[in-house]
Amino acid sequence: MMKHLLTLFLFSLLSITNAQATQENDVLPTILPLLQENTVASKQQAINTIATSSDPRKAAYLQALLAGELYLHPDGTLALITNNQALDAKTTEALQLPDTEFKKITTTNNLRSQLRKALEQLNMTDPDPKVRLQAATNLLSTITPEIAQYWRQLLGTETDSKVKAALQLGLDLADLNATEKSTRLQAIQLLAGNLAPEVRKRLQPLTTDSDPDIAQAAQRSLKQINDQIKLYSYAETLFFGLSLGSVLVLAAIGLAITFGVMGVINMAHGELMMLGAYTTYFIQQLLPNFIDYSLILAIPAAFIVSGLMGILIERTVIRHLYGRPLETLLATFGISLILQQLVRTVVSPQNVPVANPSWMSGSLEINSVLSLTYNRLYIVIFCLIVFTLLFMVLRKTNLGLQVRAVSQNRAMARAMGVRSARVDALTFGLGSGIAGVAGVALSQLTNVGPNLGQSYIIDSFMVVVFGGVGNLWGTLVAGLSLGVVNKLLEPWAGAVLAKILVLIFIILFIQKRPRGLFPQKGRAAGD
Amino acid sequence: MLLTILRNDRGGQIMLSVLLATLIAVPLLNLLVPAGNPLHVPTYLVTLMGKYLTYALLAIAVDLVWGYLGILSLGHGAFFALGGYAMGMYLMRQIGDRGVYGNPDLPDFMVFLNWKELPWFWYGFDMFWFAMIMVILVPGVLAFLFGWLAFRSRVTGVYLSIMTQALTYALLLAFFRNEMGFGGNNGLTDFKDILGFSLQADGTRIALFIASGIAVIAGYLLCRYIINSKLGRVVVAIRDAESRTRFVGYKVENYKVWVFTVSAMLAGIAGALYVPQVGIINPGEFSPLNSIEIVIWVAIGGRATLYGAVLGAILVNYSKTVFTGLMPESWLFMLGALFVLVTLYLPQGLAGIVNQFKARRSSKQVTA
Amino acid sequence: MSDGEGARFITEQKLDTSHKAILYLEDLNVSFDGFKAINNLSLYIDKGELRCIIGPNGAGKTTMMDIITGKTKPDSGQAWFGQTIDLLKMTEPEIANAGIGRKFQKPTVFESHTVAENLELAMHGNKSVWYSLKAKLTGTQQFLIDDTLRTIGLTEHYYRPAGALSHGQKQWLEIGMLLVQEPHLMLVDEPVAGMTHQEMDRTAELLVSLAGERSVVVVEHDMEFVRSIADKVTVLHQGSVLAEGSMDEVQNDPRVIEVYLGE
């Protein structure tokens, strides 16, 4: 609909300038007989004529043809008909409808692709560099000597560097088919290191060229390109690994506090994450029109919900079990069952849909082989922010000081006037709140359901244990490196086997170094 | 012999007597009392009780390591499942050409996966004796390797618990894979017969029930014998003061590995008896939840009593059957609450209540 | 093998004390996070000797015991038991079975076992897993337990759980455990803490009677007690030997006085 109106508008707009158009600019007299001939060849010629002419209405002609809106009357009137409105192409006056004698000018697949190409070509002079870049990229695969000729002119006046590069690439590609060997060789060399898929497609056949020089040069360039692609694919794996690692760190870091700093095994940690994810869901339900912002709001909300739940758990259960880690493990496992069932009963046993805000979708394109999706990118950034904040809280605030004091020597801290019961509750609340925040992040990556927590709890423990209990840096390094290792293994082992291998690795690692990568030093480390 | 093992074990004496009476009475009530009679025990109930008994044996195995050695294993479900798989493989081979695809050489799921020949690790499982050796050997070897690595490097406490949980989790993931050759997601099922007897027949089911009961009795006596021996005293010494035990000259890791391995073997036997009675084994048995549930059976019954483990396993599973039937929603709430309440208010379990009561009475007698 | 008596099963090496000394500690160094707990410590204990080791808190007495019994591995140095047994290559149980017994500063007994069982567990003999499964108390072992219980004065507590004993009784039980272990070398950390004067005298008597046949190293804070038993005293300070000699010599050593009375 919009397009039709646009075409109409174009025509009427151009009709004003048309009056001033010189006789030789007007393409209509040339193409009319060709269109009337009504063969594929004649139409092809007509399109070519339009495309190479300097008629200001040529874009409108091409678009109308492509859309099948150009009609021909036996009396030689060419008309644009859309929505039962007809315009005479010559006079740009409205025509009386219905007129059954108008015949649509049909196009074949080939003609349509020719039309599209011609239109792209037109876009090459569009004032918007983005449009020009897109047009140039689209044309790369079908570049002809004529187009190349035209591009050479464009290159001289082009100001945008990206468009320039695309034009140059197109010219180099065109040169591959040049008759002179030196030109071809030069083009092959120039194309080395270019990652556009088109380049590989074109160089590949040249590696078996009858001319050994060309073949050799092509092989060299291709190898260089493939090496680079490999490098970028490693970079991509690394990025995937870091984003997975960030998820692990987010999931584990709250645990690192409750387990590492307080020595409490919280098996309900996964369910506190689940609560965070459900908080996101409920906030989205409450503010259905603000999906883009509600996620931001969900972060503090999830922190509070999970944090309060954590404090509740600490006050009612864990408090009575200090110094009995195995019992704490069992009791908190019971709590995790209760929380899961609570969600199943109160909300639903099924997964709930959590929307992704628009700014989370899409990707950051580094080059034609490497692009970083925004959701993964934000997870990495988010993880680092959470880590930094937590680190600051523990290092710089009074609460952090008290937490560290209690974790190192409870009796002494109490003697110094630290209210250890309050510190315990707050620490546990802090760890739980972080779990909730992690849940918000998870809600953007995975299904939100009652079992969400279960699937992360073992991984989280592995991260904390691997990194060394009581060491936040250890958790960060362990989480990120386990993520990367996992992703490195995945291509040849498959996702599940990779995970198994990582688990086995950690089990063996802990046998070798029972205190993890970064063992906690000092008195607290001793049994 | 028997009497010396059970000396000073009132709970065990009572438990074993009740169990023995049940083992005799239930088959009689099933076979001799006609179906309409209120005293008749239907076959499905016999099988259900048989299932509980395999759980009881599993609980004994966990109590041996947790109650006496102080190792909280969150991975005993894995040993149970491995024993179950070994039995399942035998039962699978017994199907022969009676499967859906009628292939005499390959189990159905392999035909379905387009496999051409039997993987090497399935060799020998058509023989009952071989499968039975594997039932004990596979969990035993795994426990030995894991224990040897873990105990030698002195991984203890919650670390060890988490490692055992990771172990069963890794196995869970592995057995879900079709490529592993154990039927993937669906596991092994559609069993037909065992040693030539149809698994559907009442007689077979009663025999399996009795076998499970005997296994519980034998497992109980074995564990009691171990606990009563000097080895048992060393094991408890390790639980109470590990490093002190080292300083009087005991190689703690050897003791731990030994007990852990024996316990894993018992769990494997329990799994092997479980599978023919429920008719299926799938990777779900490896789930960490299963393993941790066993611990709560033991905790409810009472740690370090052995009979408490039997009591707890049967009680919890009976409640589970009842409540999942009546109000399925409530079961996980109850189980969760059990975990919390038992650890908070009943650290000695049900056996502890009895002992406390007894202790109070005897102290009254002393003062009187 | 059958009666589990006398012979030592686990160590292949025999204790060789042909050069008089039973324990050689040479140039030992241990540091924890930069803090030097043991600093170039060298110490020799002769066969049959009763040696007292004194020193202020943090002098490295307990760490030294930890090294000898295999709990802590030094950063450098040597520790030999007799001429042939390298202690640094052995684990705690191997060292215990080679004939070094230890009584801890804080009495640690097996609380849920009876007093008699505590002695049974500590008694020398084959301590392998399979052997323990079938082990029965022999007549001689039973006699040893009864005899030891008499020595430590706990005969009427035979069936009592060790956890129910008083602090002093636990001290005695630990000494009893050390006795039934029949070690060549006894390391005794603060044996008289929490004891009455009467008990202290009995302990002193016991330790003195043990020396000669066995070597005994006593770490003690109670100077009066040390004076009552010691023929040779070693003073540790900041992880190394400050002075060595008879009690009188040591007490008159200006460096020792300085350490004990402050600068």
Image: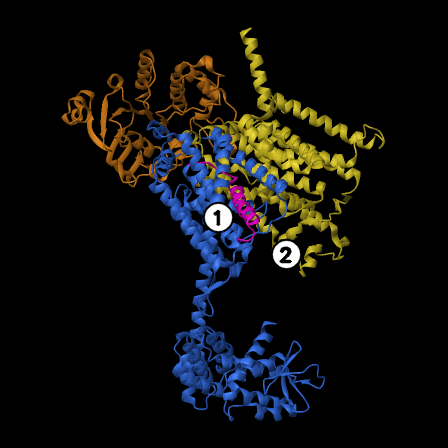
Q: Which residues are magenta?
A: A262-290
Q: Which amino acid lies under the numbered mark 2 shown in the image of this protein?
A: Pro
Q: Against A437, is B109 above or below?
A: below
Badge 1: chain ID: A
Find disc 1 in the rendering and name its residue.
A297
Helix, strand or loop at label 2? It is loop
Chain C colour? orange
Query: Is residue B226 something that shows in the picture?
Result: no
Q: Residue at x 57, y 23 (%)?
A: B352
- As for residue A199 lying within the magenta part, the answer is no
Relative side of A440 to C257, left or right = right
Q: Residue at x 43, y 91 (%)?
A: A180
Find disc 2 in the rendering and name its residue.
B119
Q: Nearer the viewer, residue C164 or B159?
A: B159
Badge 2: chain ID: B
Which chain did the image draw in yellow? B
Q: Nearer the viewer, residue A449 or B50?
A: A449
Q: Against C201, is B194 above or below?
A: below
Question: What main secondary structure does the magenta stretch of the protein show?
Answer: helix
Chain A colour? blue
Q: Are marks 2 and 1 on the same chain?
A: no
